């Protein structure tokens, strides 16, 4: 991976665009999360402001985190490493910038439609049909740009990060269209139990075929580069890649274990949820063995530090996820805050950390300037680490209280005061995450636009 | 294995296609033939509009519609079946239970309770963390209420009819004045309960517990001083009982216990037997008797053997 003149000529406009997109929408996304968390402890705080009712704030938070913060953050690093790894220029920066613009229009539409109550009410598939079309179109443009760049490569071997990025773009384009029932613009849903099965097939693949492969792709790029060492094993890369696509796609029905869906489908979902250990450990062993003995170099680079922490979070969220697919565990954990905690380790701890790590790793390299402030980035790292570990502990406790109380015959209403304290602490931790997003945006924007103060 | 663009593209798309065939298409054929269940009925136009309002406001993020075999709470009398959902597009199973499951909500309360509850959930349920929905306006709240009252379908219809039948009688009794109203209320309690005094004597600890239960469950309708003037009162008819009228009208601990346990169907008074266990019901009943009725039979001629904890 030596640099050549052609790559130096790249201006990385697309990567920079996604970088700013991610940093900006992270503020909006975490603000919505904080607002929702506040409403759960003080429901009168937005009383009778229809657009800010909890049931609209929550999907806005979730969609902005997924499509506003995490995905563009990972795409920023991906659009940076694509030309470098393939030893060519990006097929079309113009097309890339157009994608960034379309993406941001899509996000503005998402916020406007969801807060005004225009929703399909299916988790992660809330966006109405015109917005769905924008999402699919954006992914189609990314697929085109990715594959055309691969075609023009001068490096004959295709590195593992490229596999993951290409597969993520292609498969998400397809599953997004399928999961959003895009051929039925009025409502974008099937009817009855088949709708639940399709929804969770799609819903889980937002993590399985979008966030996870993009995150793994970024980790596979950043970690070996930061420590200047070759990847531990090509075989593990292959195993992890194909196993991920085979196994992850089977498991959506583990969201429906307590619902009248066919038992054989539940069995498939449970078995494959346990089998998730294979792709997860193939990747983790590969990346951790690559970094073995070189953690000093990881620690020295703020980007690599974020990314490596993300891989540790991936370990926890995956083991927890496999465990949660067991029916006996789910008797306690289903329908309560345990699952919310799990979602936060996965999306913020794993994908979010790696997205930020990718941003911080590529930012100085594509601007040719040092980071505006290494201290701020480090500070953000600790805010997020404390925040996400705190979320996990607090929401897991709250979930155990709820789940066990319900199993013991207490009504949902009775349990609300028992989890109030944990809701308060959760909102307080949310403040850390929101503050970190504001600091991150400031740091990233200063790095990009204010070169003269760059020494930080 | 050499990873070329063609291998990555074709390989991943083919795997996806195979998996979709197994976990989406096959189950689709398996489940799309589901017959409607015994309680199924189609929704009316007003109920469908209400469902749309339910969707627009994200009610699904806090309320499941999916009763499980392990559930004890609201709706647990009927475990969900695939045939319950045959017209639900989209299906609204939900993934969180910040509020109760609503599968069988229809007929649980009369319409006026829902009205008060939507205007401000804390009017009827002081511990609730649900947002207020007054901003929706009268018409939308009526549709939303119609939808909520339809949840449970034919079972809900039976419950709603029961509410309506008893509401007529409750209104009639209320309009006949306190004497006849109280007499009617007492007459709904089985005879052996009517004669039963509260078996546990009044104690400071018991009153303190009753006070807390009263604040958490009763105050929204009956008001902080038990005069029936809680914030929900303007929405409810017959209005919440002013406990003072029970004085010298044959009230017993048994009547209080039964009415709290079982509720007064047809009025906004819900049953509390799912929320509260025995001691809590005796305690809150005695709190009302001591402070608001000023007439308590707690511990009078209880008979039986004293409970082991009694001093």
Image (cartoon, rainbow, N blue to C red):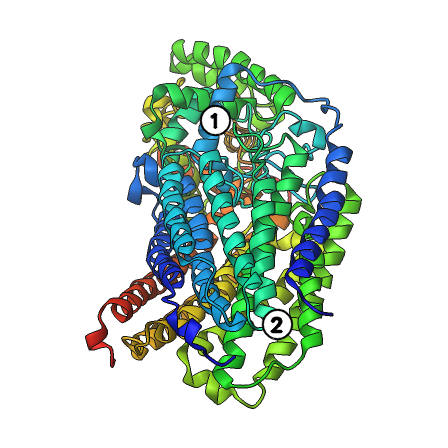
Q: Is residue B307 visible?
A: no
Q: Where is residue B264 in the image (x, y as percent from the top left)?
A: 51, 24
Q: In the rendered view, would you say B138 is above or below A187?
A: above
Q: Can residue A109 be seen in this view?
A: yes
Instruction: Give x and y (percent) for residue B180.
Output: 44, 12
The answer for which chain carries disc 1 is: B
Q: What element carries label 2?
A: loop
Q: Residue A156 carries which label?
A: 2
Residue appearing at x 68%, y 67% in the figure: B3
Front residue of A357 and B189: A357
Whole-number angstrom distance, CA of label 2 to CA of label 1: 55 Å
Q: Which residue is depicted at the point 37% across and 58% down?
A: A26
Disc 1 target residue: B52
Image quadrant where residue A207 sits? bottom right
- Tell me: B78 left or right of A51: right
Q: The N terminus of chain B appears in which quarter of the rendering?
A: bottom right
Q: Is residue B118 or residue A120 the one in the foreground? A: A120
Q: Is disc 2 surrounded by few (<14), some (14 to 19) or many (20+) residues within 10 Å? A: few
Instruction: Tally the numbered discs.
Output: 2
């Amino acid at each position: 991976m030596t640099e050549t003149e052609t790559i130096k000529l790249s201006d990385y406009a697309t990567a920079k665009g996604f970088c700013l997109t991610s940093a900006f929408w992270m503020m909006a996304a975490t603000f919505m999360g904080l607002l929702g968390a506040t409403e759960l402890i003080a429901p009168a705080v937005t009383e009778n402001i229809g657009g800010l009712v909890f049931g609209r704030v929550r999907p806005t938070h979730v969609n902005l985190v997924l499509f506003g913060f995490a995905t563009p953050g990972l795409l920023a690093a991906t659009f940076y490493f694509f030309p470098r790894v393939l030893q060519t220029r990006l097929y079309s920066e113009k097309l890339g910038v157009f994608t960034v613009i379309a993406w941001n229009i899509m996000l503005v539409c998402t916020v406007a439609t969801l807060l005004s109550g225009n929703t399909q009410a299916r988790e992660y598939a809330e966006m109405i049909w015109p917005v769905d079309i924008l999402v699919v179109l954006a992914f189609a443009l990314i697929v085109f740009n990715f594959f055309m760049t691969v075609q023009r490569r001068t490096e004959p071997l295709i590195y593992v990060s490229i596999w993951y990025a290409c597969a993520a773009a292609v498969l998400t384009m397809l599953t997004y269209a399928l999961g959003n029932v895009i051929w039925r613009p009025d409502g974008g849903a099937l009817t009855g139990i088949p709708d639940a099965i399709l929804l969770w097939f799609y819903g889980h693949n937002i993590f399985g075929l979008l966030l996870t492969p993009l995150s793994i792709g970024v980790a596979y790029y950043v970690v070996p580069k930061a420590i200047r060492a070759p990847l531990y094993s090509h075989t593990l890369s292959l195993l992890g890649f194909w196993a991920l696509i085979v196994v992850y796609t089977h498991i959506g029905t583990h969201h429906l274990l307590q619902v009248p869906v066919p038992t054989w489908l539940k069995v498939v979902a449970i078995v494959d949820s346990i089998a998730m250990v294979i792709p997860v450990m193939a990747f983790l062993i590969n990346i951790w063995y690559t970094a073995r003995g070189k953690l000093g170099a990881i620690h020295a680079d703020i980007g690599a530090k974020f990314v490596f922490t993300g891989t540790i979070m991936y370990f926890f969220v995956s083991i927890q996820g496999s465990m949660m697919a067991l029916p006996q565990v789910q008797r306690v954990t289903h329908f309560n805050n345990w699952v919310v905690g799990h979602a936060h380790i996965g999306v913020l701890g794993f994908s979010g950390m790696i997205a930020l790590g990718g941003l911080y790793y590529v930012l100085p390299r594509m601007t040719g300037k040092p980071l505006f402030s290494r201290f701020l980035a480090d500070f953000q790292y600790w805010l997020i680490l404390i925040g996400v570990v705190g979320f996990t502990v607090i929401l897991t406790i709250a979930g155990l209280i709820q789940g066990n109380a319900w199993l013991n015959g207490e009504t949902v209403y009775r349990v609300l005061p028992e989890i109030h304290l944990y809701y308060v602490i959760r909102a307080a931790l949310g403040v850390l995450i929101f503050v970190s997003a504001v600091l991150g945006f400031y740091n990233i924007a200063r790095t990009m636009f204010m070169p003269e103060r760059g020494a930080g | 294995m050499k990873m070329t663009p063609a291998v990555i593209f074709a390989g991943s798309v083919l795997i996806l296609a195979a998996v979709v065939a197994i976990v989406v298409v096959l189950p689709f054929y398996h489940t799309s033939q589901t017959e409607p269940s015994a309680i199924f009925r189609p929704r009316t136009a007003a109920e469908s509009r209400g469902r749309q309002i339910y969707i627009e406001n994200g009610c699904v993020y806090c309320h499941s519609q999916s009763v499980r075999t392990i559930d004890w709470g609201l709706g647990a009398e009927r475990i969900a079946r695939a045939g319950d959902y045959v017209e639900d597009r989209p299906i609204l199973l939900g993934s969180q239970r910040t509020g109760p499951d609503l599968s069988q909500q229809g007929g649980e309360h009369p319409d006026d309770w829902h009205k008060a509850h939507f205007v401000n959930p804390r009017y009827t349920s002081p511990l609730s963390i649900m947002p207020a929905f007054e901003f929706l306006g009268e018409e939308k709240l009526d549709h939303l209420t119609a939808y909520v009252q339809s949840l449970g379908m034919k079972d809900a219809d039976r419950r709603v009819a029961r509410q309506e039948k008893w509401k007529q009688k409750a209104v009639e009794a209320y309009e006949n004045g306190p004497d006849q109203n109280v007499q009617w209320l007492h007459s709904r309690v089985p005879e052996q309960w009517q004669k039963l005094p509260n078996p546990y004597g009044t104690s400071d600890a018991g009153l303190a517990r009753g006070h807390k239960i009263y604040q958490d469950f009763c105050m929204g309708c009956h008001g902080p001083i038990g005069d029936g003037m809680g914030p929900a009162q303007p929405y409810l008819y017959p209005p919440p009982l002013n406990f003072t009228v029970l004085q010298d009208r044959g009230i017993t601990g048994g009547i209080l216990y039964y009415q709290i346990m079982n509720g007064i169907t047809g009025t906004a008074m819900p049953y509390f037997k799912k929320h509260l266990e025995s001691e809590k019901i005796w305690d809150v009943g005695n709190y009302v008797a001591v402070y608001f009725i000023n007439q308590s039979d707690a511990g009078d001629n209880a008979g039986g053997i004293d409970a082991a904890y009694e001093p």
